[in-house]
Image (cartoon, helix red, strand yellow):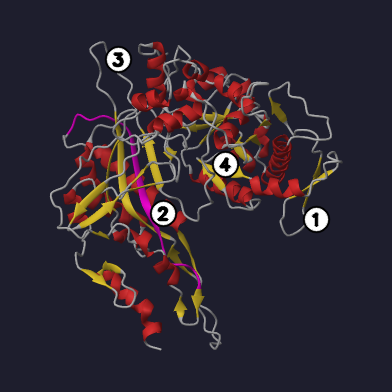
């Protein structure tokens, strides 16, 4: 029984999860408010990717064929939404709006339409100034520096909907701290929701809880334009049950963030002791046999050790069994990530009914590459403030553009469609294969046009990567192609002095920047290679992508936007390739997804990235680094050695 012990809870945080209502449709409605009262849908290729609630009231739904939608609702208004730049820009605008409220910088975006915000410090501060004898007349201070900046609220009640529905607020003078903290969090979320609607024109559905997992799930209970707070008790006790566990137990296993498609399949089959039956459908379908969290958790054979054996294996992170065991009990200690200046990766993808000829592949690769380079220039370029000597009376030169970060890795991913079976059906497959290579530096040349760069990158690099994934000349049939740049290396800081740019920050970060060039004192190891075919992991920090066979939804996977079916928790690959005595250490992003330098074969590394195997040691500080980096390093010491 010790193995089945319930893991301990840490419920000290207050996490708010925002989910914008019908986001794609809301972007159009923000520009044209008259659409809000009309049945309105957004189309990508031949599919409705979203529709507003008036359209849903008339029988329309997501992932519906356009011809079926027009038959069900002839007066539906449809706008083409294949240009996702408008959605990306709107998402960034709303993210920046929410980020203005944070004190600790912990605001994390999930896809285009979801944001987590850790408001623990704001709630803690207002708990200290709260008058518990007059909870009905409370004031929430949203500015740490201005005590008049805030709003009045009634701390004796929960703003919005509580979970459970029959929850009643305590009327006693003394209220448990956790209960009071969740009330304060609910009122802050309500205030921010209203500000978002009044100032930006977007409605949202919000969940408030003590973790990312619970806040995301509980927020979906009252859609649209509602909010729900998961109230204590959150831990089981002898006197009563846990609201968190009761809430979790009712969810189908695949609906739990962190348990992706593949993991859910293994859990279903273990509980059923046979393969689960699936319904046929346009996109992915659904299982005919719902296996709830309660069924899995209460199975006498399931414990962390068994889950490790069942779900672990090559490519799975150590401890996945305990991780899933915690999720089954509604426990998630994952932190809300700090707001980032630059994304951890930029990714563009599209899906296809059939893609099986080289001319078609080249056309699609050129299209995706142009979009990728365009996004790089939008997301990774900033204004370089011109330096002007105070003694110079001339006006400053116009600001130039600078790269905020240099992605080091280019990754190509495809999803081959399975061949037809003898009975004419096709087996479902969500397996992606990927190949990575160093990103050529010419991509950072701003004097060259995007079209010219895309054509050069495809012909010189991406076609070779594609051939490594698909060495056969024909016969492959692709349902998806994804192109991404990863391994962001941020450039030097922005601070300047009268003597020029202050590069001290860059050298303080040299361990991170030069982590791909770690010295091996022993004799160099050669002839080490890796298979180029990789299956990307599946992570819960990604929403379900509608890109699949027959649906053809284009999808930008910026930063954290790969589909959940393709990023299952526990399939993280960290690769290391050795060449010329150096180790290229693959790294993983905050979600554990493969974000490695990606030199899958030794030949690629030698062909595409020259490595200087001469190592110098600084005579002033003893630092060891490649000779090309030592030149700049010595310049950093120059003011100290030549006074």
State which tag comes first along the sequence, 4 or 2.
4
The 10 Å Cα crowd at callout 4, few under 14, some 14 to 19, many 20 or more, is: many
Residue farthest to the front?
Answer: 2
Q: Tell me the residue that label 1 is attached to.
A: 148
Q: Position of residue 310 (x, y in %)?
A: 35, 24
Relative side of 600 to 23, left or right:
left
Q: Residue at x 78, y 49 (%)?
A: 129
Relative side of 577 to 118, left or right:
left
Q: Are marks 1 and 2 in contact (CB under 8 Å)?
A: no
Q: Residue at x 66, y 37 (%)?
A: 203
Q: Tell me the residue that label 2 is attached to.
A: 376
Is residue 238 rendered magenta in the image? Answer: no
Q: Which residues are magenta?
A: 474-495
Q: Nearer the viewer, residue 493 or 419?
A: 493
Q: CA distance from mark 4 to mark 2?
A: 22 Å
Q: CA distance from mark 1 to mark 2?
A: 41 Å
Q: Quadrant of the C terminus?
A: bottom left
Q: CA distance from mark 4 to mark 1?
A: 27 Å
The 10 Å Cα crowd at callout 3, few under 14, some 14 to 19, many 20 or more, is: few
Q: CA distance from mark 2 to mark 3?
A: 40 Å
Q: Tell me the residue that label 4 is attached to.
A: 115
Q: Nearer the viewer, residue 595 or 248?
A: 248
């Amino acid at each position: 029984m010790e193995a089945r012990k319930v893991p301990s809870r840490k419920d000290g945080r207050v996490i708010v999860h925002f989910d914008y209502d019908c986001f794609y449709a809301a972007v159009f409605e923000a520009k044209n408010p008259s659409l809000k009262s009309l049945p309105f849908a957004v189309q990508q290729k031949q599919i409705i990717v979203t529709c507003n609630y008036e359209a849903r009231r008339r029988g329309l739904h997501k992932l519906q064929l356009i011809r079926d939608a027009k038959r069900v609702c002839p007066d539906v208004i449809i706008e083409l939404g294949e240009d996702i730049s408008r959605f990306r820009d709107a998402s960034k605008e709303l993210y920046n709006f929410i980020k203005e409220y944070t004190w600790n910088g912990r605001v994390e975006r999930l896809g285009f339409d979801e944001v987590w915000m850790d408001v623990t410090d704001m709630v803690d501060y207002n708990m200290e100034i709260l008058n518990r004898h007059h909870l009905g007349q409370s004031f929430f201070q949203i500015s740490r520096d201005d005590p008049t900046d805030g709003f009045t609220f009634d701390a004796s009640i929960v703003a919005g909907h509580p979970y459970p529905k029959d929850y009643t607020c305590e009327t006693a003078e003394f209220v448990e701290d956790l209960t009071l903290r969740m009330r304060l969090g609910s009122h802050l979320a309500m205030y921010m929701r209203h500000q978002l609607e009044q100032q930006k024109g977007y409605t949202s559905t919000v969940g408030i809880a003590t973790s990312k997992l619970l806040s995301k799930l509980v927020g979906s209970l009252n859609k649209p334009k509602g909010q729900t707070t998961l109230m204590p008790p959150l831990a089981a006790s002898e006197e009563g049950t846990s609201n968190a566990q009761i809430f979790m137990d009712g969810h189908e296993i695949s609906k739990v963030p962190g348990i992706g498609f593949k993991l859910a399949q293994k859990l279903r089959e273990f509980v059923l002791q046979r393969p689960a039956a699936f319904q046929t459908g346009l996109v992915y379908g659904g299982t005919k046999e719902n296996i709830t969290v309660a069924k899995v958790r209460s199975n006498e054979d399931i414990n962390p050790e068994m889950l490790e054996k069942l779900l672990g294996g090559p490519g799975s992170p150590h401890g996945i069994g305990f991780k899933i065991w915690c999720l089954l009990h509604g426990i998630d200690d994952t932190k809300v990530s700090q707001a980032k200046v630059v994304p951890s990766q930029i990714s563009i993808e599209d899906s296809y009914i059939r893609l099986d000829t080289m001319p078609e592949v080249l056309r699609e690769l050129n299209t995706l590459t142009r979009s990728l380079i365009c996004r790089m220039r939008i997301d990774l370029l900033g204004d370089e403030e011109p330096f002007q000597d105070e003694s110079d009376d001339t006006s400053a030169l116009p600001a130039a553009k600078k790269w905020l970060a240099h992605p080091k890795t280019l990754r190509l991913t495809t999803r081959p469609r399975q061949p037809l079976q003898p009975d004419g059906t096709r087996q479902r497959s969500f397996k992606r294969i990927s190949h990575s290579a160093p990103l050529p530096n010419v991509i950072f040349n701003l004097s060259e046009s995007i079209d010219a760069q895309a054509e050069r990158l495809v012909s010189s690099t991406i076609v070779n990567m594609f051939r490594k994934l698909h060495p056969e000349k024909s016969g492959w049939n692709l349902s998806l192609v994804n192109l991404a740049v990863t391994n962001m290396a941020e450039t030097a800081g922005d601070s300047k002095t009268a003597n020029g740019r202050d590069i001290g920050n860059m050298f303080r970060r040299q361990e991170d920047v030069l982590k791909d060039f770690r010295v091996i004192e022993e004799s160099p190891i050669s002839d080490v290679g890796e298979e180029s075919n990789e299956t990307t992991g599946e992570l819960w920090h990604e929403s379900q992508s509608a890109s699949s066979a027959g649906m053809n939804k284009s999808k930008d996977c910026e930063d954290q936007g790969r589909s959940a079916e393709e990023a299952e928790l526990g399939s993280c690959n960290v690769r290391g390739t050795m060449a010329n005595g150096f180790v290229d250490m693959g790294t993983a992003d905050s979600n554990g997804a493969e974000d490695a330098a990606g030199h899958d074969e030794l030949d690629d590394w030698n062909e595409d990235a020259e490595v200087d195997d001469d190592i110098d040691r600084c005579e002033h500080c003893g630092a060891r680094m490649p000779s090309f980096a030592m030149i700049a390093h010595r310049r950093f010491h120059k003011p100290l050695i030549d006074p």
